[in-house]
């Protein structure tokens, strides 16, 4: 399996997650898109680029959980600025903003999102055992509340997935959400990944568990959907007692986006230690 970070620096028509077994998720108002502005051509005479790049989740009134590979300073030019949008269709909003504010990427970004400050886990990129691939963007709570109504996601207690164990996880329903592209489509020029930019959701099922990673199956014959490019940082919920618990964030998977969603657990010591200064943990 080719493992790829599911981040995107471009977008197309507004569909997301995989096209199979996926549906729009207007009710998941806590799930948002990470929008960025940055200098992508090293030319100060041209406007900066503005685009949605990752997904994420509000975990309290002013904290947006996402992936470290979406925010790490060494992956971006020095002038990058981040915004959080909880719009259902952020790509449509960006298109509208671009028409209304030509040549002004900051105005375009502000038309869909609230600017925030990114905090990336210091240990990222870590290693295969623990990538430390977790980050938050702190945003002004009042500005978020003025634009959107949402209930922050529920985080797990420490070691929840270990306590549940594979047998229980095998019969647990999982839901992935995000703004990413569809699975690979074959064409004369090779694989492409159409869509992206609207909030979607899809069912997944348990595959494997280790110290920091949860692997979720996104195979169509089993009724699953799954994540793809641009879903990085987005939530993977376990349905426990009839409630959604944000047990992991999308990080990587197979390049065509057909088989496995490899997600970073939020119930581990690393994740909880990082999150503790930003949010009240259960």
Image (tube, grey):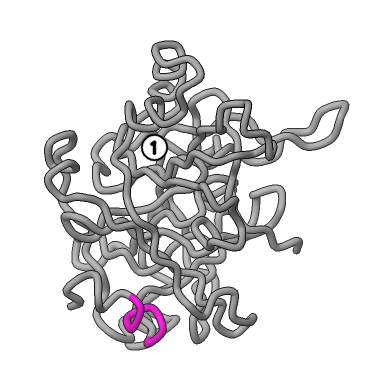
Residue 69's image quarter? bottom right
The front one of 239 and 231 is 231
The front one of 87 and 178 is 87
Task: Specify the quadrant that holds the C terminus.
Answer: bottom left
The front one of 60 and 3 is 60
Task: Specify the quadrant that holds the N terminus.
Answer: bottom right
Among all residues in the image, which is located at the extreme front? 45
Residue 105 appears in the figure: yes
In x, y percent, where is residue 243? 20, 60
The front one of 33 and 262 is 33
Circle 1 SS class: loop
Which residue occupies 52% across, 84% down? Answer: 210
Which residue occupies 51% across, 19% down? Answer: 103
**Magenta part of the protein: which range?**
269-274
Among all residues in the image, which is located at the extreme top? 99
Residue 125's image quarter? bottom right
User: Which residue, given by chain and number where applicable, does mark 1 sit on?
Assistant: 199
User: 10 Å neighbourhood of mark 1: few (<14), some, or many (≥20)?
Assistant: many
In x, y percent, where is residue 270? 41, 84
* Magenta highlight on residue 273: yes
Determine the main secondary structure of the stretch shown in magenta. Answer: helix
Which residue occupies 59% across, 53% down? Answer: 76
* Magenta highlight on residue 30: no
């Amino acid at each position: 399996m080719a493992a790829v970070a599911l981040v995107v620096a471009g977008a197309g028509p507004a569909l997301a997650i995989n096209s199979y077994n996926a549906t729009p998720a207007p009710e998941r108002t806590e799930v948002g898109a990470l929008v960025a502005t940055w200098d992508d051509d090293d030319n100060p005479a041209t406007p900066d680029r503005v685009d949605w790049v990752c997904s994420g989740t509000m975990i309290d009134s002013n904290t947006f959980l996402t992936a470290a590979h979406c925010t790490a300073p060494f992956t971006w030019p020095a002038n990058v600025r981040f915004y959080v949008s909880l719009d259902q269709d952020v790509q449509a909003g960006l298109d509208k903003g671009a028409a209304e504010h030509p040549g002004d990427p900051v105005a375009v970004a502000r038309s869909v999102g609230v600017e925030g400050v990114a905090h990336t886990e210091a240990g990222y990129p870590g290693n295969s055992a623990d990538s430390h691939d977790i980050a938050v963007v702190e945003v002004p709570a009042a500005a978020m509340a003025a634009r959107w109504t949402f209930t922050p996601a529920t985080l797990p207690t420490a070691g929840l997935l270990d306590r549940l164990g594979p047998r229980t996880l095998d019969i647990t329903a999982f839901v992935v959400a995000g703004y990413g592209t569809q699975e690979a489509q074959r064409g004369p020029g090779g694989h492409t990944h159409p869509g992206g930019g609207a909030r979607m959701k899809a069912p997944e099922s348990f595959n494997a568990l280790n110290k920091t990673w949860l692997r979720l199956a996104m195979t169509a014959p089993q009724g699953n959907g799954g994540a793809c490019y641009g879903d990085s940082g987005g939530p993977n919920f376990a349905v426990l007692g009839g409630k959604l618990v944000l047990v992991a964030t999308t990080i990587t998977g197979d390049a065509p986006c057909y088989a496995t969603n490899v997600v970073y657990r939020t119930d581990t010591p690393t994740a909880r230690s990082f999150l503790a200064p930003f949010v009240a943990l259960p």
